[in-house]
Image: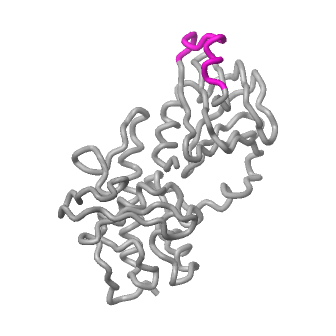
Amino acid sequence: MAEGDTLARARLRLAPVLDGQLVTEFWTRKLRGHRPRSGQRIEQVRSVGKHLLIDFDKNLTLETHLGMNGSWRVYPDRQLARNDRKRFDPYLKVLIATDAGYALCFRAPTIKTFIRGNEEGALARLGPDLCDPAFDLDEILRRVARMPETTELIDVLLNQSVACGVGNIYKSETLHIQKHDPFLTIGDVTEQDIKDLFNKAAELLQRNSVDGKQRRSITPQKGFFVYERFRKPCLRCDTPISRSYRGTNSRSTYWCPTCQPKKVASNHAR
Protein backbone atom coordinates (compact mmCIF):
# COMPACT_ATOMS: atom_id res chain seq x y z
CA MET A 1 0.00 0.00 0.00
CA ALA A 2 1.21 3.51 -0.82
CA GLU A 3 2.73 5.29 2.17
CA GLY A 4 2.90 8.97 2.98
CA ASP A 5 6.11 9.65 1.06
CA THR A 6 4.57 8.16 -2.11
CA LEU A 7 1.79 10.74 -1.99
CA ALA A 8 4.17 13.56 -1.09
CA ARG A 9 6.27 12.75 -4.16
CA ALA A 10 3.14 12.52 -6.31
CA ARG A 11 2.18 16.01 -5.13
CA LEU A 12 5.57 17.34 -6.23
CA ARG A 13 5.11 15.81 -9.69
CA LEU A 14 1.54 17.05 -10.11
CA ALA A 15 1.97 20.60 -8.83
CA PRO A 16 3.68 22.05 -11.95
CA VAL A 17 0.88 20.70 -14.16
CA LEU A 18 -2.09 21.48 -11.90
CA ASP A 19 -1.41 24.26 -9.36
CA GLY A 20 -3.12 27.49 -10.43
CA GLN A 21 -4.19 26.04 -13.80
CA LEU A 22 -7.57 26.02 -15.50
CA VAL A 23 -9.04 22.60 -16.26
CA THR A 24 -9.32 21.99 -20.01
CA GLU A 25 -10.61 18.43 -19.64
CA PHE A 26 -11.75 16.27 -16.72
CA TRP A 27 -12.65 12.60 -16.96
CA THR A 28 -13.09 9.98 -14.27
CA ARG A 29 -14.52 6.52 -13.78
CA LYS A 30 -17.03 5.96 -10.94
CA LEU A 31 -16.61 9.28 -9.16
CA ARG A 32 -18.47 9.75 -5.87
CA GLY A 33 -19.57 13.35 -5.42
CA HIS A 34 -19.70 16.49 -7.55
CA ARG A 35 -17.74 16.45 -10.81
CA PRO A 36 -15.16 19.18 -11.50
CA ARG A 37 -15.80 21.00 -14.78
CA SER A 38 -13.70 22.33 -17.60
CA GLY A 39 -12.89 25.97 -16.90
CA GLN A 40 -12.57 25.48 -13.13
CA ARG A 41 -9.32 26.62 -11.58
CA ILE A 42 -7.19 24.20 -9.59
CA GLU A 43 -5.98 26.03 -6.51
CA GLN A 44 -3.42 23.48 -5.29
CA VAL A 45 -2.45 19.84 -4.92
CA ARG A 46 -2.01 18.54 -1.36
CA SER A 47 -0.97 15.27 0.21
CA VAL A 48 -2.19 14.29 3.67
CA GLY A 49 -0.91 10.95 4.87
CA LYS A 50 -1.93 8.39 2.27
CA HIS A 51 -4.45 10.71 0.58
CA LEU A 52 -3.86 12.88 -2.49
CA LEU A 53 -6.11 15.97 -2.53
CA ILE A 54 -6.67 18.32 -5.48
CA ASP A 55 -8.37 21.56 -4.46
CA PHE A 56 -10.54 23.19 -7.14
CA ASP A 57 -12.21 26.58 -6.83
CA LYS A 58 -15.76 26.73 -5.42
CA ASN A 59 -14.44 24.79 -2.37
CA LEU A 60 -14.47 21.46 -4.24
CA THR A 61 -11.73 18.89 -3.49
CA LEU A 62 -10.97 15.66 -5.33
CA GLU A 63 -9.69 12.93 -2.99
CA THR A 64 -7.88 9.79 -4.15
CA HIS A 65 -6.52 6.97 -2.03
CA LEU A 66 -4.12 4.75 -3.99
CA GLY A 67 -4.58 1.52 -2.04
CA MET A 68 -2.11 -1.24 -2.94
CA ASN A 69 -1.51 -0.54 -6.64
CA GLY A 70 -2.66 2.99 -7.44
CA SER A 71 -0.44 5.70 -8.90
CA TRP A 72 -0.43 9.22 -10.35
CA ARG A 73 1.56 10.03 -13.51
CA VAL A 74 2.26 13.29 -15.29
CA TYR A 75 2.55 13.81 -19.06
CA PRO A 76 3.67 17.10 -20.62
CA ASP A 77 1.30 18.92 -22.95
CA ARG A 78 0.93 17.35 -26.44
CA GLN A 79 2.70 14.18 -25.34
CA LEU A 80 -0.55 12.35 -24.64
CA ALA A 81 -2.57 12.13 -27.85
CA ARG A 82 -6.23 11.21 -27.47
CA ASN A 83 -5.76 7.85 -29.21
CA ASP A 84 -2.91 6.98 -26.84
CA ARG A 85 -5.31 6.82 -23.92
CA LYS A 86 -6.78 3.55 -25.14
CA ARG A 87 -3.66 1.71 -24.03
CA PHE A 88 -4.33 2.74 -20.42
CA ASP A 89 -7.77 1.12 -20.16
CA PRO A 90 -9.14 -0.38 -17.97
CA TYR A 91 -6.73 0.93 -15.32
CA LEU A 92 -7.15 4.65 -15.97
CA LYS A 93 -9.35 6.15 -13.24
CA VAL A 94 -8.88 9.94 -13.50
CA LEU A 95 -7.62 12.25 -16.26
CA ILE A 96 -7.11 15.97 -15.66
CA ALA A 97 -5.83 18.16 -18.50
CA THR A 98 -4.58 21.75 -18.29
CA ASP A 99 -2.51 23.94 -20.61
CA ALA A 100 0.53 22.67 -18.67
CA GLY A 101 -0.06 18.97 -19.30
CA TYR A 102 -1.95 15.88 -18.18
CA ALA A 103 -2.30 14.23 -14.77
CA LEU A 104 -3.49 10.62 -14.84
CA CYS A 105 -4.45 8.40 -11.94
CA PHE A 106 -4.41 4.61 -12.27
CA ARG A 107 -5.97 1.80 -10.23
CA ALA A 108 -7.00 4.01 -7.27
CA PRO A 109 -9.82 2.31 -5.31
CA THR A 110 -11.06 5.59 -3.77
CA ILE A 111 -12.08 8.48 -6.03
CA LYS A 112 -14.47 11.04 -4.60
CA THR A 113 -15.05 14.75 -4.12
CA PHE A 114 -16.20 16.74 -1.12
CA ILE A 115 -16.87 20.35 -0.23
CA ARG A 116 -14.00 21.67 1.87
CA GLY A 117 -15.07 22.01 5.47
CA ASN A 118 -17.28 18.91 5.13
CA GLU A 119 -14.57 16.25 5.27
CA GLU A 120 -15.86 12.90 6.42
CA GLY A 121 -14.81 9.32 7.03
CA ALA A 122 -11.15 8.38 7.26
CA LEU A 123 -9.94 11.80 6.12
CA ALA A 124 -11.69 13.57 8.98
CA ARG A 125 -10.16 11.21 11.54
CA LEU A 126 -6.54 11.47 10.40
CA GLY A 127 -3.85 12.26 12.95
CA PRO A 128 -0.91 14.62 12.30
CA ASP A 129 0.84 14.07 8.97
CA LEU A 130 4.38 12.78 9.55
CA CYS A 131 5.47 14.06 6.13
CA ASP A 132 4.90 17.59 7.42
CA PRO A 133 8.05 18.90 9.18
CA ALA A 134 5.76 20.80 11.56
CA PHE A 135 3.78 17.74 12.65
CA ASP A 136 2.35 17.94 16.19
CA LEU A 137 4.12 15.31 18.32
CA ASP A 138 2.19 16.32 21.46
CA GLU A 139 -1.10 15.64 19.67
CA ILE A 140 0.20 12.20 18.65
CA LEU A 141 1.07 11.43 22.27
CA ARG A 142 -2.42 12.49 23.38
CA ARG A 143 -3.95 10.12 20.83
CA VAL A 144 -1.68 7.26 21.87
CA ALA A 145 -2.65 7.87 25.52
CA ARG A 146 -6.29 7.18 24.61
CA MET A 147 -5.42 3.72 23.26
CA PRO A 148 -5.49 0.55 25.43
CA GLU A 149 -2.12 -0.24 26.99
CA THR A 150 -2.34 -3.69 25.40
CA THR A 151 -2.13 -2.21 21.88
CA GLU A 152 0.99 -3.50 20.14
CA LEU A 153 3.49 -1.10 18.61
CA ILE A 154 2.82 -2.46 15.12
CA ASP A 155 -0.80 -1.32 15.42
CA VAL A 156 0.10 2.02 17.01
CA LEU A 157 2.33 2.96 14.08
CA LEU A 158 -0.20 1.85 11.46
CA ASN A 159 -3.15 3.63 13.06
CA GLN A 160 -3.77 6.60 10.76
CA SER A 161 -5.96 8.31 13.38
CA VAL A 162 -2.88 8.53 15.63
CA ALA A 163 -0.48 9.82 12.97
CA CYS A 164 -0.83 9.44 9.22
CA GLY A 165 1.66 8.33 6.61
CA VAL A 166 3.18 5.12 8.04
CA GLY A 167 2.54 1.81 6.25
CA ASN A 168 4.13 -1.62 6.37
CA ILE A 169 7.54 -0.42 5.15
CA TYR A 170 8.07 2.39 7.63
CA LYS A 171 6.48 0.40 10.44
CA SER A 172 9.00 -2.42 10.07
CA GLU A 173 11.98 -0.17 9.31
CA THR A 174 11.31 2.23 12.20
CA LEU A 175 10.95 -0.57 14.74
CA HIS A 176 14.19 -2.14 13.50
CA ILE A 177 16.15 1.10 13.65
CA GLN A 178 14.87 1.77 17.18
CA LYS A 179 15.62 -1.88 18.15
CA HIS A 180 12.12 -2.62 19.43
CA ASP A 181 10.44 -6.00 19.37
CA PRO A 182 7.43 -5.18 17.14
CA PHE A 183 5.04 -7.01 19.46
CA LEU A 184 5.72 -4.91 22.53
CA THR A 185 2.66 -3.01 23.72
CA ILE A 186 2.15 0.61 24.70
CA GLY A 187 2.32 -0.50 28.33
CA ASP A 188 5.75 -2.09 27.77
CA VAL A 189 7.52 1.08 26.65
CA THR A 190 8.14 4.60 27.87
CA GLU A 191 6.68 7.82 26.57
CA GLN A 192 10.16 8.67 25.31
CA ASP A 193 10.16 5.41 23.32
CA ILE A 194 6.88 6.47 21.67
CA LYS A 195 8.33 9.90 20.89
CA ASP A 196 11.45 8.35 19.39
CA LEU A 197 9.42 5.97 17.23
CA PHE A 198 7.29 8.69 15.67
CA ASN A 199 10.23 11.08 15.29
CA LYS A 200 12.18 8.37 13.45
CA ALA A 201 9.21 7.46 11.26
CA ALA A 202 8.78 11.15 10.39
CA GLU A 203 12.49 11.48 9.60
CA LEU A 204 12.35 8.54 7.18
CA LEU A 205 9.16 9.72 5.49
CA GLN A 206 10.41 13.28 5.07
CA ARG A 207 13.80 12.13 3.78
CA ASN A 208 12.01 10.31 0.97
CA SER A 209 9.53 13.12 0.24
CA VAL A 210 11.79 15.86 -1.08
CA ASP A 211 11.99 14.91 -4.77
CA GLY A 212 9.13 13.92 -7.04
CA LYS A 213 11.36 11.36 -8.79
CA GLN A 214 13.30 10.19 -5.77
CA ARG A 215 13.58 6.46 -5.13
CA ARG A 216 12.65 5.44 -1.61
CA SER A 217 15.61 4.26 0.49
CA ILE A 218 16.32 3.62 4.16
CA THR A 219 19.83 2.18 4.31
CA PRO A 220 23.09 3.60 2.96
CA GLN A 221 22.89 0.83 0.34
CA LYS A 222 19.66 2.39 -1.00
CA GLY A 223 17.42 -0.39 0.23
CA PHE A 224 15.68 -1.63 3.36
CA PHE A 225 17.00 -3.10 6.58
CA VAL A 226 14.22 -5.68 7.04
CA TYR A 227 11.20 -5.00 4.80
CA GLU A 228 10.64 -7.87 2.31
CA ARG A 229 13.88 -9.50 3.47
CA PHE A 230 12.27 -12.61 4.99
CA ARG A 231 14.94 -15.25 5.70
CA LYS A 232 17.67 -13.02 4.30
CA PRO A 233 20.52 -12.02 6.64
CA CYS A 234 20.10 -8.93 8.79
CA LEU A 235 22.34 -6.14 7.50
CA ARG A 236 23.53 -5.53 11.07
CA CYS A 237 24.09 -9.01 12.49
CA ASP A 238 23.42 -11.64 9.74
CA THR A 239 20.49 -13.20 11.66
CA PRO A 240 17.76 -14.34 9.23
CA ILE A 241 14.89 -11.84 9.11
CA SER A 242 11.54 -13.01 10.50
CA ARG A 243 8.08 -12.19 9.22
CA SER A 244 4.64 -12.23 10.84
CA TYR A 245 1.09 -11.32 9.84
CA ARG A 246 0.09 -10.66 13.43
CA GLY A 247 -1.86 -7.52 14.30
CA THR A 248 -4.90 -5.63 13.04
CA ASN A 249 -5.83 -6.60 9.47
CA SER A 250 -3.00 -9.19 9.42
CA ARG A 251 -0.50 -6.82 7.84
CA SER A 252 3.05 -8.11 7.25
CA THR A 253 5.78 -7.19 9.73
CA TYR A 254 9.50 -7.91 9.25
CA TRP A 255 12.04 -7.86 12.08
CA CYS A 256 15.39 -9.20 13.27
CA PRO A 257 15.10 -11.46 16.36
CA THR A 258 18.65 -10.52 17.43
CA CYS A 259 18.55 -6.75 16.91
CA GLN A 260 14.98 -6.53 18.21
CA PRO A 261 14.95 -8.93 21.17
CA LYS A 262 11.89 -9.59 23.28
CA LYS A 263 12.21 -7.29 26.26
CA VAL A 264 10.14 -5.01 28.46
CA ALA A 265 11.26 -1.51 29.40
CA SER A 266 11.68 -0.83 33.12
CA ASN A 267 9.51 2.32 33.00
CA HIS A 268 6.06 2.27 31.54
CA ALA A 269 4.54 4.83 29.20
CA ARG A 270 1.62 5.43 31.56
Question: What residue is at 54 percent from the left and 12 percent from the top?
Answer: 79
Q: Is residue 212 left or right of residue 148?
A: left
Q: Quadrant of residue 75?
A: top right
Question: What residue is at 68 percent from the left and 22 percent from the top?
Answer: 22
> In this view of the protein, which residue sits in the foreground, 63 or 238?
238
> In this view of the protein, which residue sits in the foreground, 92 or 135?
92
Q: x and y percent of residue 140 in the render?
A: 51, 69
Q: Is residue 19 left or right of residue 263?
A: right
Is 223 located above or below residue 193 in the figure? above
> In this view of the protein, which residue sits in the foreground, 235 or 171?
235
Query: Is residue 148 highlighted in magenta?
Result: no
Q: Is residue 178 left or right of residue 73?
A: left
**Residue 199 visible in the current orientation:** no
Q: x and y percent of residue 155 in the render?
A: 51, 69
Residue range highlighted in magenta: 76-89
The chosen color scheme is: one colour
Check the image and name the residue furthest to the front. 231
Q: x and y percent of residue 199 in the render?
A: 38, 63
Is 14 located above or below residue 176 in the figure? above
Q: x and y percent of residue 269 in the render?
A: 43, 84
Question: What residue is at 61 percent from the left and 23 percent from the top?
Answer: 88
Q: Quadrant of residue 55?
A: top right
**Residue 14 visible in the current orientation:** yes
Question: What residue is at 67 percent from the left and 30 percent from the top?
Answer: 94
Check the image and name the residue furthest to the right. 34
Check the image and name the residue furthest to the left. 237
Query: Is residue 79 highlighted in magenta?
Result: yes
